[in-house]
């Protein structure tokens, strides 16, 4: 059978390894496995969210309110936008997919950082679009502007802060790029880790309200990271209502589940939980920085809930990742991104201590 030609260049996305795999392969007790690979919230989700989901479990037979009225009302309040500025997706991943399908074809190209979220490329390739990357792994505004002028891409992806590197760009830098780009190019600002970035340095805070007047910019957010709802699959796009209207044409009905919707609404109402999440993170990431300095290797200053350790030639990231995996520690090897580096999600105090202990053994 002949598949679409656009599928040929696509590498299947490799998700973070699940705990079950370590249990199956090495017979390690599930409780002993430390998963620091998918940037999930180490505190889990808000207890109020868990309670709301259990209390409403019997509603599993019902389709959700397809207007997502209540969730949009919560987001409208938080971001000071109108409900027609919002589209809800099964994760912000699904919004990325809507965007690619709405705008791309084999005559178009997309621009992104050399190392960034893998799904941008996959969705763009599905549509046959050409991939252009900047030369640095960091987001360098001048590199984006230069490549924009040369190739006139249909979409520019700004992942700030960036996954899997953890670096970000300030609001001023984002606007430096925006100001050079005309209305035929969509700028996607992926703020999956914005809660962490703005808590660290307010100069990195980009508010959807800053961009909704322009028809060619969309801001993406998710409940999967700071809100601890990765398993519920809820994300959102915020943009000018004219852009949202077009993206709605791509959306299947009931694209998030009834219980995901209930969980996300409840999550919006528990700001305390996010505060606690950020406080724990800020305390624990310092240990990772100190550990790297003491062990004599470099890391990327992180604006996210993970940290990226950079190795020189005497350490191989894949060998380290495999050795950790065998000991029940799951982290992310960045070899497939062309980097000799690992990405570690900052966990609970106990998880991090265990990581340090085993990592010390493994790098000897
Ligand atoms: C996690 C993540 C997302 C979205 O995840 P969903 O679970 O699909 O909402 C989007 N972009 C980046 C950079 C991410 O790390």
Image (spheres, rainbow, N blue to C red):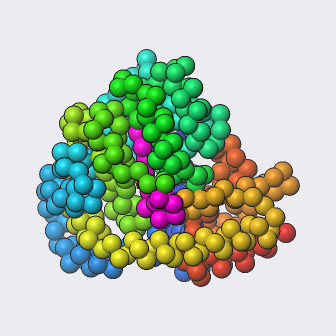
Residue furthest to the top in view is: 107
Residue at x 59%, y 32% (from the top left corner) = 143
Quadrant of res 321: bottom right
Q: What is the magenta range?
A: 188-202
Relative to 313, is 63 on the left or the right?
Answer: left
- Counting from the top left corner in percent of width and height, residue 155 is at 43, 30
Residue at x 51%, y 76% (from the top left corner) = 280
Residue at x 33%, y 54% (from the top left corner) = 235
In the image, residue 321 above or below residue 123: below
Relative to 38, is 218 on the left or the right?
Answer: left
In the image, residue 30 above or below residue 257: below
- Counting from the top left corner in percent of width and height, residue 180 is at 46, 28
Relative to 279, is 249 on the left or the right?
Answer: left
Q: Is residue 197 visible?
A: yes
- Counting from the top left corner in percent of width and height, residue 204 is at 48, 53
Foreground: 85 or 309? 85
In magenta segment, residue 258: no
Q: Is residue 10 visible?
A: no
- Number of numbered labels in the structure image: 0
In magenta segment, residue 194: yes
Quarter the N terminus occupies: top left
Foreground: 40 or 79? 79
Residue at x 71%, y 71% (from the top left corner) = 290
């Amino acid at each position: 059978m002949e598949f679409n030609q656009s599928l040929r260049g696509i590498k299947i996305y490799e998700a973070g390894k699940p705990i079950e795999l370590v249990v199956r392969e090495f017979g390690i007790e599930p409780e002993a496995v430390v998963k620091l690979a998918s940037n999930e919230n180490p505190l889990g989700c808000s207890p109020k969210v868990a309670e709301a989901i259990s209390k409403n479990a019997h509603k599993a037979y019902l389709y959700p309110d397809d207007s997502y009225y209540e969730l949009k009302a919560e987001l409208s309040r938080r971001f000071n936008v109108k409900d027609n500025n919002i589209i809800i997706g099964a994760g912000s991943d699904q919004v990325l997919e809507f965007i690619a399908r709405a705008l791309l074809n084999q005559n178009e190209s997309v621009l992104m950082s050399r190392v960034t979220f893998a799904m941008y490329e996959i969705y763009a390739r599905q549509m046959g679009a050409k991939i252009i990357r900047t030369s640095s792994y960091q987001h360098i505004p001048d590199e984006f502007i230069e490549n924009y002028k040369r190739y006139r891409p249909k979409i520019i992806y700004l992942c700030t802060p960036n996954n899997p590197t953890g670096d970000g760009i300030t609001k001023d830098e984002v606007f430096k790029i925006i100001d050079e780009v005309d209305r035929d190019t969509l700028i996607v600002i992926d703020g999956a880790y914005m809660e962490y970035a703005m808590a660290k340095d307010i100069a990195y805070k980009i508010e959807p309200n800053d961009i909704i007047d322009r028809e060619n910019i969309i801001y993406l957010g998710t409940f999967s990271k700071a809100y601890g709802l990765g398993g519920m699959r809820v994300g959102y796009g915020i943009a000018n209502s004219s852009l949202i209207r077009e993206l709605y044409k791509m959306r299947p009905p009931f694209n998030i589940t009834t219980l995901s919707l209930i969980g996300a609404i409840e999550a919006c109402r528990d700001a305390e939980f996010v505060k606690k999440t950020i406080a724990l993170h800020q305390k624990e990431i310092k240990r990772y920085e100190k550990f790297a300095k003491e062990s004599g290797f470099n890391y990327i200053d992180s604006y996210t809930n993970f940290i990226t350790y950079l190795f020189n030639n005497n350490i191989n990231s894949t060998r380290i990742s495999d050795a950790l995996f065998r000991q029940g520690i799951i982290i992310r090897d960045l070899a497939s991104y062309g980097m000799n580096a690992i990405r570690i999600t900052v966990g609970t105090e106990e998880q991090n201590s265990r990581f340090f202990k085993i990592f010390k053994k493994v790098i000897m």
